[in-house]
Image (cartoon, coloured by chain):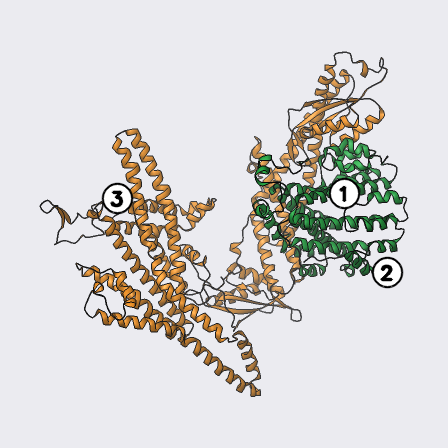
């Protein structure tokens, strides 16, 4: 508990590190991960800091790595779409490259990037030539059809017999642009052109955008020089590629044959170069993550070093940072190791700095406590030195949940899921992907406790899937003579609630009374614990004023009013009376009927004296909370001011006075402000006691809702279908009941009970003592660096 | 996408709610509230004086990249290999503006969608002129298309290279685009190849028609949109009128031709325009705009030996009024101002980058117009 109870003791340390050994030192410290460095250059621009060039270098390397990652990802996607083998199969036998230093990696990556880019350019040009040939092949094939349509003799195209010769242009254009293209051509030539087109079945790779597109082969006939010029310009502006195509069928056939041959040649070249590229990528792929880690680690080091003061004269860096006092030894060892490894002659120096600044809050957690700590920190990080509510919440949170979710059957199902998650935790940890599942998985230990306690409360309530079980044999028997149930006077039901209450006429009355009282008892106890926690805080921060004028009256008020109610509840349980008064009325009449006790509220002798004393104590405690503290603070402040005048006259203590003046500046005293603050605190506490106690009644409400809802599903869905006696209907009914049980009673109800338990902790419990205005400890630690580049 | 219809409500909606009035406050938040809030969010993301001060201290473009990475621009340059070029920075900044604008466009409903399209038409006109001029100088089509502003792109823009006069421009290409009607006034301009004067005339005719159309559309939208947008467009019209006049001195453009190019909206219209059309030198221009207070101030600031150019002065004033429009509510002027301010921001960044890369850091404050 030691590490969780309060923040680990932190200290501000100053490090004096020689510039030569600074990088090695930071590497050692980053491996340890126990120092949070302060930014000593907050007012310096990021690009004017000392190690900005190193950071830039790392960013440049990161960019190169991102480029490689992109290439690999692109290739992997491309391979997935084809039937080719996945990238891993291309992996060469050579072991992955390892680099000790950034310089080696940098030169390697620079070479690799250039090689990649050359290769891509080469690949693009090969692709372009290849697909140009493919396009041309299609154009020739389509043109055969276009020319063929005009029957065997096409006099206009014939050089010999024609009066005017028609020109033509043929080419390929993207399908989605063809309509626009056709329209513009038609307009430009005023309709004096004939355009034919046919879609190419094969998808053509577009080198510029890197995607496969559908294209159309077209041919346009026209007449005249001007038209020729225009149509070519339009083709140009649309990015349509035109091909020279011979007039005669004979020549076209020859050309086609030739092109087919060249395509075959090109295909082998293309295949070879692709293969080569994939091999390189596969090789890079296997060591990419170690490089990313190396680069990011280096960047983190220089980023941290940019926060240090650089003493140019002494060539040393001055760093300040927070670290746990227990880690002093580790830090010293790390410094020594770094000095030794860097071969520096001057050792690094560590000094502890005294400061008034508030240190960061650091709780070391394990996998069991971390999720609960996370829930508490979602509200606010504890102030340094403050008691940590997590310690109690680890148990009370699941327990309050269980009071609301009290059903042994549902809880057992939940527990099974948690146990599965915990048993296969190693495997599941690797395959985490889904956000919602991650959340459940992260909170698996809290969930386990929640379900465990719910089984317990379910057994106490005698609720299993909304039904009761006769666990120990009921103590009530039907007496035929009197026509009523009789209780066996010699026996007390051993565990939980007697199953006879289940289904009884007054079942609800009984359960409501029980759960309502239970909620109040649990609530008041938790609030009292909260107030006691505030005492621990006051003691820790040495605030005697707060103990006398806050803690004591708060305790009197809370115990006097609501503690008394709890005592009465127990009294009523232990000594049952015939004409019992309503406890709520009794408590209200403590004030409203003061100083008398109305006969209806009479429970025991001497009640009047006790209640009147309590009422007076409560009212007095309100005033004690409200008035003395601000007055005393004011008096103290006045005395301090008077002292300061005396000190100021003493010239010897000029330094001391300066230091004090700096301290004083922080607490300018404004009486009205302090008084208002105190009265807000008082009002909040007094009203809070009432409303918070009422708020705890949600324990009862949720529990009631859960029990009733499970009963309704059972009766109205499952039982109803059973009464019809139709097996198919029962089958359906069971399905609906099972689905509703999981979806509504397990998931939705658990979620709502969780949220209410959360609220009870964040508001009702923590507002008694928790400030939550600290900031978390965020050390420079390499183990947190992600080694995958997200694209 | 290419040819958005003009704003038109179906008759049932009209019968129920009366004629469309996006300026009304009842339905504004229902239809455009999200985008208004979204754009409003950019208010704090625009570069501040502080950012500019830091950027001006940079010694290299890499430094600028580092600082910009801490602003709204984020790691937009992260994938660019060093050394950076100024054009890369410009392209990337523009790309970001275009992405933001397209986000607005895809989320907009009518009539905001049409309004946003109107903003694009200005860029379209610029692109058309760019392509025509480029063709005159025998540039490659691909190169020209690359230099076009992405906001003003339309599919058939490349085909403009095949046109030789205004009527061909209209008949072959622009008739398909929403700005086709704008060119109707200058169909008789012959032969684009002949000289650049015609190109300039076409540009200004297009702009005149565009501004007037945009102005009418804003009037039609009514409400705060009409109020604010008309101010902004009037300034734009006046700026064009003054610039046309100033640039026409010593060219072949006759006074008659010139007066056809003046937009029929604006604070200067009609009295100032009349004077402008008769002006022969800069002093007469100054005289012509003297009765409009903001313009008088602009010209006063310039003075004889001031380093500032008229263009810069106009930019400053434009930023000023757009800043005011950006802080208003319940109207579309916000969106217009957003684009204009963002454009100025890009101009600023590019200017600083130019100064830094050419080692002219002394001049950096001359061309810089900080926004907020």
Subunit of mark 2?
A: B
Subunit of mark 3?
A: A
Q: Which chain is orange?
A: A
Q: Colour of chain B?
A: green
Q: CA distance from mark 2 to mark 1?
A: 32 Å
Q: Quadrant of the N terminus of chain B?
A: top right
Q: Nearer the viewer, residue A453 or B240?
A: B240
**Residue hosting label 1:** B126
Q: Nearer the viewer, residue B254 or A27?
A: B254
Could you say where residue B18 lies in the image, as x and y percent from the top left? 60, 40
**Residue hosting label 3:** A467
Q: Which mark is residue A688?
A: none
Residue B131, quarter of the rendered image: top right
Q: Residue at position x 23%, y 66% from top?
A: A598
Are the residues at dot 2 and dot 1 in contact (C-beta closer than 8 Å)? Answer: no
Q: Secondary structure at mark 2?
A: loop
Q: Is residue A421 left or right of residue A321?
A: left
Q: Quadrant of the C terminus of chain B?
A: bottom right
Q: Residue at position x 75%, y 39% from top?
A: B145
Badge 2 or badge 1: first in the primary sequence: 1
**Residue hosting label 2:** B304
Q: CA distance from mark 2 to mark 3?
A: 97 Å
Could you say where residue B73 lies in the image, as x and y percent from the top left? 64, 52
Residue B43, quarter of the rendered image: bottom right
Q: Residue furthest top?
A: A152
Subunit of mark 1?
A: B
Instruction: Mark yes or no: residue B267 visible.
Output: yes
Q: Residues within 10 Å of mark 1 (few under 14, many from 20)?
A: some
Q: Secondary structure at mark 3?
A: loop
């Amino acid at each position: 508990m030691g590490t969780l109870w309060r923040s680990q003791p932190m200290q501000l340390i100053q490090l004096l590190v020689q510039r030569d050994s600074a990088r090695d030192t930071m590497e050692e410290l980053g491996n340890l991960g126990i120092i949070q460095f302060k930014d000593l250059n907050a007012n310096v621009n990021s690009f004017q800091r000392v190690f900005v060039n190193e950071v830039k270098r790392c960013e440049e390397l990161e960019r190169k790595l991102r480029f490689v990652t992109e290439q690999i990802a692109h290739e992997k996607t491309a391979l997935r779409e084809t039937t080719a083998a996945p990238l891993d199969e291309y992996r060469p036998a050579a072991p992955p490259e390892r680099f000790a230093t950034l310089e080696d990696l940098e030169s390697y990556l620079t070479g690799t990037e250039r090689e990649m880019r050359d290769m891509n350019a080469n690949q693009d040009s090969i692709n372009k030539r290849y697909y140009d040939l493919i396009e041309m092949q299609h154009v020739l094939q389509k043109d055969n059809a276009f020319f063929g349509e005009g029957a065997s003799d096409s006099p206009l195209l014939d050089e010999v017999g024609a009066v005017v010769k028609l020109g033509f242009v043929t080419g390929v254009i993207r399908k989605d642009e063809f309509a626009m293209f056709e329209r513009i051509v038609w307009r430009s030539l005023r309709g004096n052109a004939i355009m034919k087109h046919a879609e190419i079945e094969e998808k053509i790779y577009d080198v510029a955008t890197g995607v496969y597109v559908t294209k159309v082969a077209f041919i346009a006939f026209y007449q005249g020089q001007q038209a020729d010029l225009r149509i070519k310009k339009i083709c140009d502006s649309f990015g349509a590629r035109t091909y020279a195509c011979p007039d005669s069928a004979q020549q076209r056939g020859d050309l086609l044959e030739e092109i087919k041959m060249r395509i075959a040649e090109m295909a082998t070249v293309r295949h070879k170069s692709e293969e080569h590229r994939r091999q390189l990528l596969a090789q890079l792929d296997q060591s990419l993550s170690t490089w990313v880690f190396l680069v990011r680690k280096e960047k983190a080091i220089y980023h941290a070093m940019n926060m240090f003061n650089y003493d140019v004269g002494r060539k040393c860096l001055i760093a300040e940072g927070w670290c746990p006092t227990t880690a002093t030894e580790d830090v010293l060892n790390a410094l020594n190791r770094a000095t030794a490894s860097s071969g520096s002659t001057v050792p690094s120096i560590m000094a502890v700095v005294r400061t008034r600044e508030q240190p960061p809050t650091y709780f070391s957690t394990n996998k069991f406590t971390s999720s609960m700590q996370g829930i508490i920190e979602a509200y606010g990080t504890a102030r340094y030195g403050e008691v940590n509510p997590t310690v109690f919440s680890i148990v009370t949170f699941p327990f309050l949940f269980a009071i609301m979710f009290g059903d042994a059957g549902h809880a057992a199902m939940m527990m099974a899921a948690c146990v599965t998650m915990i048993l296969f935790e190693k495997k599941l940890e690797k395959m985490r992907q889904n956000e919602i599942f991650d959340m459940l998985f992260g909170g698996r230990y809290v969930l386990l406790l929640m379900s465990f306690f719910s089984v317990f409360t379910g057994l106490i309530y005698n609720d299993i899937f909304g039904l009761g079980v006769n666990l120990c044999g009921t103590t009530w028997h039907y007496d035929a003579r009197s026509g009523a149930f009789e209780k066996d006077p010699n026996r007390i039901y051993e565990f939980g609630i007697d199953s006879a209450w289940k289904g009884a006429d007054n079942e609800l009355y009984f359960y409501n009374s029980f759960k309502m009282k239970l909620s109040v008892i649990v609530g008041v106890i938790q609030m009292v614990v909260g107030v006691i926690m505030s005492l621990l805080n006051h003691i820790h921060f040495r605030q005697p004023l707060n103990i006398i004028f806050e803690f004591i009256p708060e305790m009197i008020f809370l115990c006097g009013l609501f503690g008394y109610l709890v005592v009465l509840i127990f009294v009523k349980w232990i000594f049952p009376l015939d004409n019992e008064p309503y406890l709520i009325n009794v408590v209200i009449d403590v004030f409203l009927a003061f100083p008398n006790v109305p006969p209806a509220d009479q429970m025991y002798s001497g009640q009047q004296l006790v209640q009147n004393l309590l009422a007076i104590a409560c009212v007095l405690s309100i005033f004690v909370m409200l008035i003395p503290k601000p007055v005393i603070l004011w008096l103290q402040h006045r005395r301090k001011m008077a002292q300061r005048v005396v000190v100021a006259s003493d010239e010897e203590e000029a330094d001391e006075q300066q230091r004090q003046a700096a301290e004083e500046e922080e607490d300018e005293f404004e009486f009205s402000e302090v008084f208002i603050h105190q009265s807000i605190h008082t009002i909040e506490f007094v009203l809070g006691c009432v409303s918070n106690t009422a708020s705890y009644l949600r324990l009862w409400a949720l529990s009631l809702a859960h029990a009733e809802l499970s009963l309704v599903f059972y009766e109205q869905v499952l039982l109803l279908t059973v009464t019809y006696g139709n097996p198919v209907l029962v089958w359906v009914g069971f399905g609906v009941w099972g689905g509703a049980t999981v979806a509504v009673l397990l998931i939705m109800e658990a979620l709502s009970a969780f949220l209410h338990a959360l609220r009870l902790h964040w508001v009702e419990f923590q507002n008694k003592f928790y400030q939550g205005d600290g900031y978390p400890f965020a050390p420079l630690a390499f183990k947190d660096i992600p080694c995958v580049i997200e694209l | 996408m290419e040819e958005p219809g003009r704003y038109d409500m179906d008759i049932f909606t009209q019968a129920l709610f009366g004629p469309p009035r996006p300026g009304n406050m009842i339905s504004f938040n229902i239809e455009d509230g999200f985008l208004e809030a979204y754009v409003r969010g950019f208010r704090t993301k625009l570069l501040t004086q502080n950012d500019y001060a830091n950027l001006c201290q940079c010694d290299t473009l890499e430094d600028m990249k580092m600082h910009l990475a801490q602003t709204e621009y984020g790691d937009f340059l992260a994938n660019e290999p060093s050394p950076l070029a100024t054009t890369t920075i410009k392209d990337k900044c523009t790309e970001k503006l275009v992405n933001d604008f397209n986000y607005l466009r895809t989320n907009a409903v009518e009539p905001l969608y049409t309004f946003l399209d109107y903003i694009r038409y200005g860029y379209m006109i610029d692109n058309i002129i760019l392509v025509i001029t480029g063709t005159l100088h025998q540039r490659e089509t691909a190169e020209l298309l690359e230099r076009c502003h992405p906001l003003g792109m339309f599919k058939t823009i490349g085909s403009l290279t095949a046109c030789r006069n205004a009527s061909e421009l209209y008949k072959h290409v622009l008739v398909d685009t929403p700005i086709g009607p704008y060119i109707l006034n200058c169909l008789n301009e012959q032969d684009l190849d002949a000289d650049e004067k015609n190109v300039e005339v076409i540009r200004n005719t297009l702009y005149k028609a565009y501004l007037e159309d945009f102005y009418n559309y804003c009037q039609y939208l009514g409400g705060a949109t009409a109020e604010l947008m008309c101010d902004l467009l009037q300034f734009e019209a006046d700026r064009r009128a003054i610039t046309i006049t100033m640039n026409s001195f010593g060219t072949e453009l006759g006074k008659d031709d010139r007066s056809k190019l003046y937009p029929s909206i604006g604070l200067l219209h009609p009295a100032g325009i009349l004077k402008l059309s008769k002006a022969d030198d800069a002093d007469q221009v100054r005289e012509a705009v003297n009765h409009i207070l903001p313009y008088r101030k602009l010209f006063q600031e310039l003075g004889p030996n001031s380093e500032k150019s008229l263009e810069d002065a106009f930019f400053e004033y434009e930023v000023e009024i757009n800043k005011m429009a950006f802080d208003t509510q319940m109207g579309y002027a916000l969106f217009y101002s957003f684009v204009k301010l963002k454009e100025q921001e890009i101009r600023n960044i590019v200017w600083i980058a130019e100064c830094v890369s050419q080692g002219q850091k002394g001049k950096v404050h001359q061309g810089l117009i900080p926004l907020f």
